Amino acid sequence: MSDLPVLYSFRRCPYAIRARLAIASSGRPVELREIVLRDKAPEFLQVSPSATVPCLDTGDDVIDESWDIMLWALEDSDPENWLEPETGSMDEMQALVLQCDGPFKSHLDRYKYDVRYEDANREDERAQAAGFLAGLDERLKQGRWLFGSTASLADYAILPFVRQFANADRTWFDAQDWKPLRTWLEAFESSHAFQTVMPKWTKWVSGNAPVRFPAEQTSLTRA
């Protein structure tokens, strides 16, 4: 058994990706347990109020929202200053993330999984989601990252969802006049940060040897 906080995660889930990014940046280690969404471990279902990933069991509390997990990690240790953007404020970052998690994510789901929604029109949902992306593209014309020349919490909270949108139809996405946005996403996908949080883990079952995450303390923004 490990004495570390336990993070229940799923590799491809954008909410879980953002949580892992913050934990890796902070250097605050956890025990990672990879959950298969179609066959959720009973131990996970006993812990998570929503039965969704990510879910963090600190030993004293259960944190069931990805944004709150990011703050849990970074408020303890923020060596790359994600909580202190070069321009703007924490409130402005949170407002942008709320747009991502609210209207954009709703349209993204109805675009990518349109067959699950009787009233969803794939092209209409894509167009609605694209409005948010166009706004990000305008912001990125002013700097490499959303709030200046260095990455912040907002970038890493939003990028996993932009990646999910792009991968729904990469040919269409790449054809759009969003050069700053595409450059931002491509830099993320090729980054050390992304590689650090995306190795393939085996499905966790009770009795498995603990998996420490991050495997080593390291800066996410190194070359």
Image (spheres, rainbow, N blue to C red):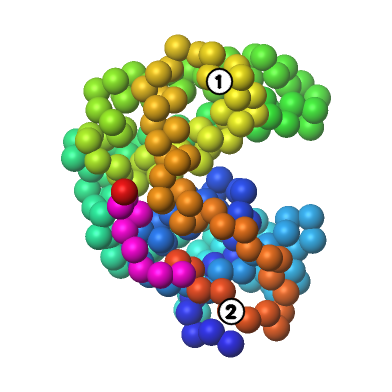
Please rate how many residues cluster around mark 2, counting C-alpha atoms within 10 Å: few if below 14, some from 14 to 19, many from 20. some
Pick the residue in front: 179 or 60: 179
Q: Position of residue 60 (x, y in %)?
A: 47, 79
Q: How many numbered discs sit on the rendered protein?
A: 2
Say which amino acid is labelled 2.
Answer: Pro
Q: Is residue 66 visible?
A: no
Say which amino acid is labelled 1.
Answer: Phe
Residue ID for mark 1: 173
Q: Quadrant of the N terminus?
A: bottom right
Q: Is residue 129 left or right of residue 72?
A: right
Residue ID for mark 2: 210
Q: Position of residue 59 (x, y in %)?
A: 50, 79
Identity of the residue drawn at 73% across and 21% down:
120
Identity of the residue drawn at 72% across and 74% down:
205
State whether residue 192 is above or below residue 89: below
Identity of the residue drawn at 63% across and 81% down:
209
Mark 1 or mark 2, which has the lower sequence index? Answer: 1
Pick the residue in front: 132 or 29: 29
Span colored in magenta: 215-222
Pick the residue in front: 73 or 216: 216
Q: Is residue 218 magenta?
A: yes
